[in-house]
């Protein structure tokens, strides 16, 4: 008997009490109850075994979604904040305004620089046209001058030859006239001597005198003709020298004109430089205008704002976060044990129970399985090849999407805990 209970006392000569027997009908009820419990437990065990064999579930699951960090792309002071926590916004809605006065100045400076570069480009274009036109004219003028100079030089040389020939003929004529004048003068002297002796007639004397005078006159005329011919030679030589000078001058001009491609190349290079500067300043203006547009921070997507950290007067830096935007599309990330992943396939049906809504079952399906355990993608992945190794069952993230559109009565937000139950036998990809 257990401690603390009275022990039966047997008196001498007395009989021990007879134990009471259970009534037959109560015994039947007891046996029936035991049989029902055993049968129910057996049926429940079989059901659970079959359910567990055809389903996989885990409580290591949560809702995930796209959370966009809203941040400034340019530095500046906040002048307006147009949203609040948990506010629904649409893509393109204005969220924050940054003081744009500094950006207006930058745009004005960029446009002024572009205008100056455009003016330089136009000047370079005019310079190229002018250099080409002047060069072409100088080339034609130099070519024509060379041709004319060559023709003039040929004519001068030909004139010189004629003058020299004329001078030679005049020289010969003068020499002949001189000889004739000397001869007639000698004859006249002899005739004078004879006349003094009355050995010739006066008519003969007059004839000799006339011949001598005529020869002297012809000699004088021949000398003058010779002097004129020599003057012509000198003039022709001067003309030849002048023609040679003009030919040399126009030849030099032609050589200078032949260097025109270099001057044109320099002018065209200056034009290309000016054109590239215009293109560069166009980009500078575009960049300045683009940065100015960034003073209005717009909602990148449709969703709800969260974690607002910006206020009017704050000075923002590029990349500085000011809020988070939670997009409406959500899904479930379920971390199944690696021993269960082999039974999962994309397309399998899933019943999703959210802890926030007991009794509500959401329908979904397996979309994909991460190619690696969660620990591999952690900040400090395990190094099993070093140190002591302890085998631990790993978890593999599985992405589950909702089949039905969201019901506005049930808020499904990233981070909420869920329990997904996967039907193993379902799914188009199940072998």
Image (cartoon, helix red, strand yellow):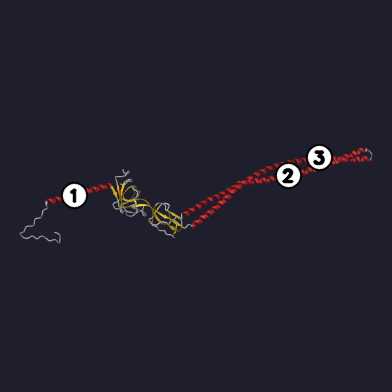
**Left or right: 323 as drawn, with respect to 201:** left
Task: Residue at 52% x, 55% y: name it.
Answer: 108
Question: Depth-wise, is mark 2 or mark 1 nearer the camera?
Answer: 1
Task: Residue at 92% x, 38% y: name it.
Answer: 203
Q: Residue furthest left?
A: 13
Task: Residue at 81% x, 43% y: name it.
Answer: 224
Frontmost residue, 336 versus 420? 420
In whole angstroms, how far apart are the C-alphas of marks 3 and 2?
26 Å
In whole angstroms, how far apart are the C-alphas of marks 3 and 1?
172 Å
Tag 2 residue:
239
Q: Is residue 224 visible?
A: yes
Q: Are marks 3 and 2 in contact (CB under 8 Å)?
A: no
Point out which mark residue 173 bears: 3
Q: Is residue 247 above or below residue 416?
A: above
Going from the N terminus, do you reach mark 3 or mark 1 first? Answer: 1
Viewport quadrant of the C terminus: top left
In whole angstroms, how far apart are the C-alphas of marks 2 and 1?
148 Å
Question: Depth-wise, is mark 3 or mark 1 nearer the camera?
Answer: 1
Frontmost residue, 200 versus 267? 267
Residue 417 point in image, percent of width and height: 32, 53
Tag 1 residue:
36
SS assignment at label 1: helix
Residue 290 point in image, percent of width and height: 48, 53
Q: Residue furthest front?
A: 409
Q: Are marks 3 and 1 in contact (CB under 8 Å)?
A: no
Instruction: Answer few, some or many: residues within 10 Å of disc 1's Cα (few below 14, many 20 plus, some between 14 and 19).
Output: few
**Left or right: 297 as drawn, with respect to 238:** left
SS assignment at label 2: helix
Frontmost residue, 398 versus 265? 398
- The answer to which quarter of the image holds residue 311 is bottom left
């Amino acid at each position: 008997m257990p401690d603390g209970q009275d022990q039966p006392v047997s008196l001498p000569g007395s009989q021990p009490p007879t134990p009471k027997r259970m009534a037959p009908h109560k015994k039947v009820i007891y046996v029936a109850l035991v049989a029902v419990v055993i049968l129910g437990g057996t049926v429940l065990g079989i059901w659970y075994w079959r359910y567990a064999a055809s389903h996989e579930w885990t409580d290591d699951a949560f809702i995930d979604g796209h959370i966009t960090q809203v941040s400034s792309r340019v530095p500046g002071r906040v002048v307006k904040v147009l949203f609040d926590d948990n506010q629904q916004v649409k893509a393109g809605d204005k969220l924050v305004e940054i003081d744009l006065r500094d950006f207006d100045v930058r745009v004005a400076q960029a446009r002024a620089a572009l205008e100056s570069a455009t003016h330089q480009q136009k000047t370079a274009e005019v310079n190229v046209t002018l250099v080409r036109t002047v060069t072409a004219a100088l080339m034609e003028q130099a070519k024509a001058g060379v041709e004319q100079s060559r023709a003039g030089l040929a004519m001068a040389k030909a004139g010189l030859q004629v003058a020299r020939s004329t001078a030679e003929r005049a020289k010969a004529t003068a020499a002949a006239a001189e000889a004739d004048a000397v001869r007639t003068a000698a004859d006249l002297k002899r005739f004078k001597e004879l006349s003094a002796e009355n050995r010739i007639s006066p008519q003969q004397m007059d004839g000799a005198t006339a011949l001598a005078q005529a020869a002297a006159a012809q000699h004088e005329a021949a000398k003058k003709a010779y002097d004129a011919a020599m003057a012509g030679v000198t003039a022709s030589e001067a003309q030849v020298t002048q023609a040679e000078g003009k030919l040399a001058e126009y030849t030099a001009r032609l050589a200078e004109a032949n260097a025109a491609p270099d001057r044109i190349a320099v002018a065209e290079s200056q034009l290309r430089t000016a054109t590239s500067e215009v293109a560069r300043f166009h980009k500078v203006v575009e960049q300045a205008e683009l940065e100015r547009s960034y003073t209005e921070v717009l909602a990148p997507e449709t969703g709800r704002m969260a974690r607002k950290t910006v206020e009017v007067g704050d000075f923002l830096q590029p990349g500085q976060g000011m809020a988070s935007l939670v997009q409406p599309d959500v899904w479930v990330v379920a971390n199944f044990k690696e021993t269960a992943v082999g039974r999962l396939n994309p397309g399998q049906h899933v019943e999703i129970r959210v802890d926030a809504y007991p009794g509500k079952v959401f329908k979904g399906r397996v979309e994909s399985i991460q190619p690696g355990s969660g620990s591999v993608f952690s900040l400090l992945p395990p190094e099993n090849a070093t140190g002591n190794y302890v085998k631990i069952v790993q978890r593999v993230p599985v992405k589950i999407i909702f089949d039905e559109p969201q019901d506005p009565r049930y808020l499904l937000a990233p981070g909420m805990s869920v329990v997904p139950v996967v039907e193993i036998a379902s799914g188009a990809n199940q072998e």
